[in-house]
């Protein structure tokens, strides 16, 4: 007792405890080598043993010094519950176990606010799970056959004009287009969301990009991927595949030096430009890439030295929506010859409807999409206080924005995309379908993609170490030894298979309500078992 | 399922022909009402073809309210027909006290109006009367337009015909164009305004099937035009869209089909006019229909049209003889009124075409 002080940290203070079985352990060392967090170590332990070494039992009680695996009692090198030790152990001798009595969040503010990755662990409520597709076609009209009917699963990305604004003229009984209309790309309603090279390892980013290429080229699904704020590989910018990418510009403008220089060499237009104003996981806060992840190639792509890269919370010089439209939207449109739709992404907020209304009134008709990112969106690095205590659920906000547009007869003119927690329970198709019935034109996903690549992080505090540069799965790190753990092809295949299942499941939901086109705004197809949710969203309450 | 039908004829026909077209299509308890719009009128209205004709069902008090309004707005009553009903016991009908069909002359200042302004005057008058009657609960007004008569009632179609002496063929009511329907839209409450055909500024339309994009259509249409109101039936949306595309946007009729049943994106991409078709699809996405539907309509110039949904889940057939062309949900209706026609010449419109019948009974098929 003399060596212990009450302020000393013990393993019982940590969120995960190692369940170790020395009798099964062969001391192969795989777990210690595999733990990127240095949460376990090999130590020598004096043990009391009864042994019998002869051909007949002759038990002798002895003491012996033996090597064992031990958990570190440290607030910096602590177990994150990733389970890589369990994964590599040939003898099932070790595994992390969640500690419900953890004091970690209380104790680890010695060096300032806690930072981590992942999504909110406090506000992971699932509004969408209280909503059911409850209007089934039967007798009044027939359900469709999800396997045999053709389905037209496409969503607009770009500014849609009202019919009266279209520059169409009747000539000889036919409509002829006379004049320019804003560019609109019809894409798959599932956008791979903005995870930068830097937040992700190059391999992880490449795996996602590879999946996008395959889905487009081989499966005929026009899935688009947003680059995230961090630039893109030069070769990709100059390739035909650029058409599958939405290039993001955020407040740090990281990577844009390279992008602008590549513009004259582009052989095709990108699918779009996404101006990131805010992010659901940490609204009001800029991007954050800890220096541990700013490896040499990241420095090259972003044109920065090795340092923690904090994007400002705002686009410098923009003080109003009108100014943003005038300066950023117009300049981005001009940069690509008014051929590429420019959209905007904001964190969901109590003010989202005001922003959307204002964009709808834009006289230039130039905002090509409003992306609303809810509190359940993921991030590579943020202050935990932001992740858990700031933000706004996305479901009602999409609905509010849609209904605000309906009130003005402007629905569909600036496509709405919702994200943040889509697919949290594993079924993104159901979430996407419900979001679309509530008024979203489509959804964007990020977290689920890296989970498909192998990320084990979740909203119950598992791992959440994307900010450390020590991602055990090689996804959110630039450490070459860790990155090598990720198999690009298998990762890409996992995403492709998931999206194909997503597509089939979307049909499985469209068929019973009798629709072959996406039911955007078909709130009549939904019912809710939660009265408050039903009232808020304007759908039928059922019980 | 609603059965719908229409007849366009070289010679005036009486409502009993339309009833004979519709009744064989009736199934089971499928008989909740009868409604028809007659256009290009003969009989007692033949002398007033250019004067707006009001069709309404109301109480005595309702009639007085309408009269007050029309007087106050300088409409001059020209002719009136109030049918004397056959009230024999046993008829299944939820009759209103009065059915009034009345021709008016325009107010004096209408002389200086453009056609468009006159159309708006008639619409606004009908909307104002509808509001007066609805607010007071004293009746219903269905149409107010030259050469157009609307009759609707809840009950057994055959009994309704008896009540109005439609079986008598007394020559009172006759027209060269009739659109009819023998069942209300029972997915919603049985109310008179929910019974198609619907009428708006020269456009008549009835439709069967479930409009699965009703909510989308309605939420969009509500802010498109002041005449798009009510929405007691999801089928009204088809009329509003026809009116919007053809009358408001003034696009050729073929684009109505492109709006309600747009081609799949893959097919649009192969078309020469892909810019136009994509523009329509994105700007008018909320007017798409995506359920099982057939539409029968009449345009202001008298052309009759029909088309169906993009999966052809609701059929329709067009048949003809030397004097008339009829459109019907089911062929048994055609067999009843045109037993000797050449059945091989019947047209079963496909999911991508509009069939149009003009004043000379020439039938045109337009492929989308």
Image: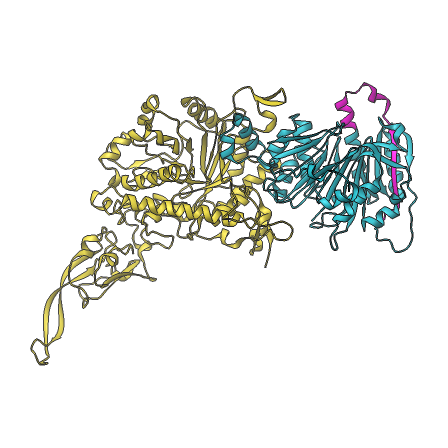
Chain colours: A yellow, B cyan
Residue at point 90%, 28% (across, down): B47
- Is residue B223 shown left or right of residue A250? right
Q: Quarter of the image holding residue A410?
A: top right
- Is residue A261 shown left or right of residue A188? left
Start-end of magenta stretch: B94-121
Q: Quarter of the image holding residue A343?
A: top left
* Residue A304 visible in this rendered orientation of the protein: no
- Is residue A374 shown left or right of residue B304? left
Q: Pick the residue in front: A498 or B18.
A: B18
Residue at point 39%, 35% (across, down): A313
Instruction: Give yes or no for residue B95 being in the magenta stretch.
Output: yes
Compared to residue A113, the image places residue B226 above or below, namely above
Instruction: Give yes or no for residue A178 being in the magenta stretch.
Output: no
- Is residue A329 shown left or right of residue B281? left
Q: Position of residue A535 (x, y in %)?
A: 59, 50
Q: Position of residue B138 (x, y in %)?
A: 84, 44
* Residue B294 visible in this rendered orientation of the protein: yes
- Quarter of the picture containing the C terminus of chain B is top right
Q: Pick the residue in front: B345 or A276.
A: B345
Q: Position of residue A58 (x, y in %)?
A: 9, 80
Q: Pick the residue in front: A208 or B42.
A: B42
């Amino acid at each position: 007792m003399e060596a212990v002080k009450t302020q000393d940290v013990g393993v019982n203070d940590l969120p995960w405890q190692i369940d170790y079985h020395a009798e099964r352990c062969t001391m192969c060392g795989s777990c210690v080598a595999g733990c990127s967090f240095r949460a376990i170590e090999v130590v020598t332990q004096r043990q009391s043993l009864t042994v019998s070494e002869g051909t007949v039992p002759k038990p002798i009680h002895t003491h012996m010094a033996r090597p064992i695996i031990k958990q570190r009692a440290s607030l910096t090198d602590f177990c994150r519950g990733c389970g890589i030790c369990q994964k590599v152990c040939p003898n099932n001798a070790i595994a992390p176990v969640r500690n419900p009595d953890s004091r970690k969040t209380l104790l680890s503010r010695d060096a300032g606010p806690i930072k981590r990755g992942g999504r909110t662990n406090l506000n992971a409520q699932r509004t969408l799970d209280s909503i059911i597709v409850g209007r089934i076609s039967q007798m009044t009209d027939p359900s469709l056959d999800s396997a045999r009917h053709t389905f037209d699963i496409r969503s607009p990305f770009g500014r849609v004009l009202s019919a009266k604004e279209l520059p169409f003229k009747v000539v000889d009984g036919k409509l002829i287009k006379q004049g320019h209309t804003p560019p609109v790309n019809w894409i798959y309603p599932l956008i791979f969301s903005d995870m930068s090279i830097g937040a992700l390892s190059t391999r992880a980013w490449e795996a996602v990009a590879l999946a996008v290429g395959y889905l487009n080229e081989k499966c005929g699904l026009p899935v688009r991927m947003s680059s995230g704020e961090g630039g893109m590989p030069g070769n990709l910018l100059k390739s035909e595949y650029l058409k599958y990418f939405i290039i993001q510009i955020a407040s740090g403008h990281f990577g844009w030096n390279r992008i602008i220089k590549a513009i004259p060499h582009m052989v095709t237009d990108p699918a779009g430009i996404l101006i990131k104003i805010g992010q659901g996981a940490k609204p009001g806060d800029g991007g954050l890439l800890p220096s541990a992840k700013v490896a040499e190639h990241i420095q090259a792509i972003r044109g920065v030295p090795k340092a923690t890269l904090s994007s400002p919370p705002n686009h410098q010089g923009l003080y109003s929506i009108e100014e943003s439209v005038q300066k950023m939207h117009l300049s981005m449109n001009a940069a690509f010859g008014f051929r590429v739709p420019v959209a905007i992404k904001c964190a969901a907020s109590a003010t989202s409807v005001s922003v959307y209304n204002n964009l709808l009134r834009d006289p230039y008709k130039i905002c090509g999409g409003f992306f609303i990112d809810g509190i359940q969106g993921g991030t590579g690095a943020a202050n935990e206080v932001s992740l858990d205590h700031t933000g706004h659920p996305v479901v009602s906000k999409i609905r509010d924005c849609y209904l605000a547009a309906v009130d003005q007869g402007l629905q569909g003119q600036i496509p709405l995309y919702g994200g943040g927690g889509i697919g949290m329970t594993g079924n993104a198709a159901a979430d996407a379908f419900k979001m679309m019935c509530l008024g979203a034109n489509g959804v964007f996903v990020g977290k689920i993609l890296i989970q498909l690549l192998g990320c084990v992080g979740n909203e119950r505090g598992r791992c959440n170490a994307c900010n450390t540069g020590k991602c055990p799965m090689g996804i959110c790190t630039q450490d070459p030894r860790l990155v090598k753990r990720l198999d690009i092809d298998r990762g890409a295949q996992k995403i492709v298979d998931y999206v194909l299942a997503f597509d089939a499941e979307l049909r499985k939901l469209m068929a019973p309500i009798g629709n072959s086109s996406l039911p955007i705004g078909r709130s009549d197809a939904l019912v809710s078992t939660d009265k408050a949710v039903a009232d808020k969203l304007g759908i039928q309450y059922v019980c | 399922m609603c059965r719908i039908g229409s007849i366009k004829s070289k010679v005036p026909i009486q409502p009993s022909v339309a009833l004979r077209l519709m009744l064989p299509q009736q199934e089971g308890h499928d008989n909740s009402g009868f409604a028809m719009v007659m256009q290009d009128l003969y009989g007692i209205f033949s002398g007033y073809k250019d004067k707006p004709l009001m069709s309404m069902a109301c109480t005595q008090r309702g009639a007085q309210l309408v009269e007050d309004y029309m007087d106050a707005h300088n409409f001059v009553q020209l002719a009136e027909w109030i049918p004397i009903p056959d009230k024999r016991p046993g008829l299944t009908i939820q009759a209103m006290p009065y059915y009034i069909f009345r021709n008016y002359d325009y107010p004096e200042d209408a002389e200086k109006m453009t056609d468009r302004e006159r159309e708006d005057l008639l619409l606004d008058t009908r909307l104002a009367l509808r509001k007066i009657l609805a607010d007071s609960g004293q009746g219903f007004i269905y149409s107010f337009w030259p050469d157009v008569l609307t009759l609707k009632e809840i009950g057994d179609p055959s009994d309704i015909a008896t009540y109005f002496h439609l079986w008598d063929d007394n020559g009172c009511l006759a027209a060269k164009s009739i659109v009819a329907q023998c069942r209300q839209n029972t997915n919603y409450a049985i109310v008179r305004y929910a019974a198609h055909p619907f009428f708006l500024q020269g456009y008549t339309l009835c439709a069967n099937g479930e409009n699965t994009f009703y909510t989308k259509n309605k939420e969009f249409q509500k802010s498109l035009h002041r005449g798009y109101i009510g929405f007691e039936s999801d089928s009204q949306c088809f009329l509003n869209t026809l009116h919007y595309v053809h009358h408001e946007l003034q696009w050729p009729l073929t684009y109505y089909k492109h709006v309600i049943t747009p081609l799949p994106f893959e097919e649009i991409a192969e078309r020469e006019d892909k810019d136009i078709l994509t523009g329509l699809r994105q700007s008018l996405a909320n007017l798409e229909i995506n359920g099982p539907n057939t539409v029968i309509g009449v345009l202001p110039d008298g052309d009759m049209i029909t088309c169906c949904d993009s999966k052809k889940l609701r059929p329709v057939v067009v048949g003809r003889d030397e004097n008339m062309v009829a459109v019907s949900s089911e062929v048994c209706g055609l067999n009843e009124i045109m037993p000797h026609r050449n059945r091989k010449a019947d047209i079963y419109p496909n999911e991508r075409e509009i069939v149009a019948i003009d004043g000379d009974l020439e039938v045109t098929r337009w492929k989308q």
